[in-house]
């Protein structure tokens, strides 16, 4: 075992240029996931249920993205190591010995990545918490907090990802003979096959994801189905890049009048043979750019619209609510007396009846507790409404 460990460490050191990109990818993914989970479980955000819920949903999205992203990076690494593995075969190592070596390599890489990612995540999660608290105008108490839940979840999720990568690598070694591995790095790309099922799956997933995003108007449903729409769009994007692009290029190739032209012939042929290798990378870039744009635009719009939202919901700086009062005029005089030494623009009393019901197709249903259409309903007289809100409704 010591020999295999020494061999695994030597391989990682010898291929440091190749593994550097893989380490950066794994550490980046682990750090991002740990930050999301730590901030979501942070006691400083206690009571901020909506923020916590969205952070937890974001953790699932990051986990799915990390799985696809790291498997793609791992496949690039193992392809460039095929020649090295074949030499071990030729020198007399059996496949079980190579499996042991690759297992130890994966364990070493996982330990380095997890330790580095979690340490960096601990530091950056505190900065992230401070930024969030500044945005929502809460008092900041900076203290280094270690979330055990976030730590355990990060270990479990990325251990599974590393295990899947190891199984993929071992499968390639077991199924290939030394001669194929020796030439594996120099073998050109074969023309990919048209995958109708994945293409249709991508179109359907992307269409359903966008339909959900565009059709939902109920805020409660939107919060629940947001994660579903994001996952469907991610699946659709990957399927269309990996299979849909091939199907489109094959379709263009089948059209002889279009394909057999100098510019079309070279560009379509080149794309067709290279798309299989680069499709996942392009999908990753597409999803990352989309996430950045959506996050920035949504955050900026929500932050800039805070004051407008407050003015719509709370049109007065202060309100005093008295329930079931038989003497509203006396209450008004008492409040006016308490405020006689204070500066204020206006003070008025407004009588209203409060109900809980539902709002369906612009019709109010009192005492109807339908959760999907739940509404708080306040009824006031037409005269009071026109007087206090400067309206002339009839």
Image (spheres, grey):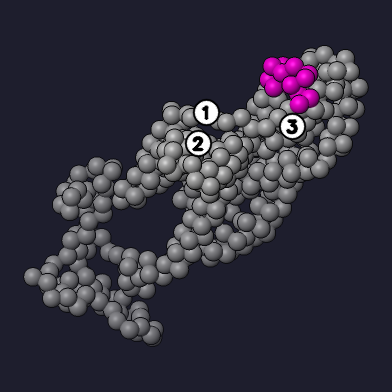
Q: Residue at x 8, y 70 (%)?
A: 394
Q: Is residue 116 above or below residue 144?
A: above
CB contact under 8 Å: marks 2 and 1: yes
**Which element type, helix, strand or loop, lies under badge 3?**
loop
Please state if 351 lies on the left or on the right of 20 as rendered: left
Q: Is residue 179 visible?
A: yes
Query: What residue would you read off at disc 2?
Result: 246
Characterize the local packing of mark 2: few (<14), some (14-19) or many (20 or more) Cα atoms within 10 angstroms: many
Q: Nearer the viewer, residue 327 or 157?
A: 157
Please state if 63 lies on the left or on the right of 47 as rendered: right
x and y percent of residue 66 in the render? Answer: 61, 39
x and y percent of residue 194 in the render? Answer: 48, 30
Comes first in the chain, label 3 or label 2: 3
x and y percent of residue 192 in the render? Answer: 55, 30
Q: Residue at x 28, y 79 (%)?
A: 347
Q: Which region is colored magenta?
A: 170-183
Query: What residue would you read off at disc 1?
Result: 193
Q: Which mark is residue 279?
A: none
Query: What residue would you read off at disc 3?
Result: 186
Q: Residue at x 31, y 76 (%)?
A: 335
Q: Is residue 130 above or below residue 383?
A: above
Q: Residue at x 82, y 28 (%)?
A: 84
């Amino acid at each position: 075992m010591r020999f295999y460990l020494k061999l695994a460490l030597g391989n990682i050191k010898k291929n440091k240029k190749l593994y550097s990109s893989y380490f950066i990818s794994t550490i980046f993914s682990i750090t991002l996931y740990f930050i999301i989970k730590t901030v979501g479980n942070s006691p400083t955000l206690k009571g901020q249920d909506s923020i916590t819920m969205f952070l937890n949903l974001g953790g699932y999205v990051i986990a799915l993205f990390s799985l696809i992203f790291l498997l793609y990076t791992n496949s690039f690494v193992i392809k460039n190591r095929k020649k090295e593995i074949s030499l071990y075969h030729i020198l007399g190592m059996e496949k079980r010995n190579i499996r042991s070596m690759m297992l130890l390599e994966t364990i070493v890489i996982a330990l380095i990545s997890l330790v580095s990612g979690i340490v960096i995540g601990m530091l950056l999660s505190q900065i992230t918490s401070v930024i969030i608290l500044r945005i929502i105008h809460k008092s900041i108490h900076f203290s280094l907090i270690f979330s055990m839940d976030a730590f355990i979840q990060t270990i479990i999720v990325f251990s599974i990802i590393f295990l899947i990568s190891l199984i993929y690598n071992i499968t390639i070694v077991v199924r290939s003979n030394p001669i194929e591995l020796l030439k594996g790095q120099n073998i050109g790309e074969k023309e990919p096959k048209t995958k109708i099922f994945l293409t249709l799956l991508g179109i359907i997933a992307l269409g359903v994801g966008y339909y959900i995003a565009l059709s939902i108007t109920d805020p409660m449903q939107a919060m629940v189905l947001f994660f579903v729409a994001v996952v469907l769009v991610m699946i659709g994007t990957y399927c269309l890049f990996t299979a849909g692009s091939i199907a489109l290029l094959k379709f263009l190739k089948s059209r002889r009048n279009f394909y057999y032209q100098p510019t079309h012939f070279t560009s379509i042929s080149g794309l067709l043979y290279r798309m299989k290798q680069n499709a996942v990378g392009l999908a990753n870039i597409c999803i990352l750019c989309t996430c950045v744009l959506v996050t920035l635009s949504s955050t900026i719009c929500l932050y800039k619209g805070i004051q407008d939202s407050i003015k719509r919901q709370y049109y007065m700086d202060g309100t005093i609510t008295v329930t079931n009062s038989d003497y509203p005029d006396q209450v008004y005089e008492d409040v006016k007396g308490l405020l006689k030494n204070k500066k204020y623009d206006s003070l008025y009393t407004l009588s209203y009846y409060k109900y809980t019901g539902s709002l369906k197709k612009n019709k109010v249903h009192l005492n109807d507790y339908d959760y999907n259409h739940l509404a708080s309903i306040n009824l006031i007289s037409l005269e009071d409404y026109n007087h206090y809100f400067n309206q002339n409704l009839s």
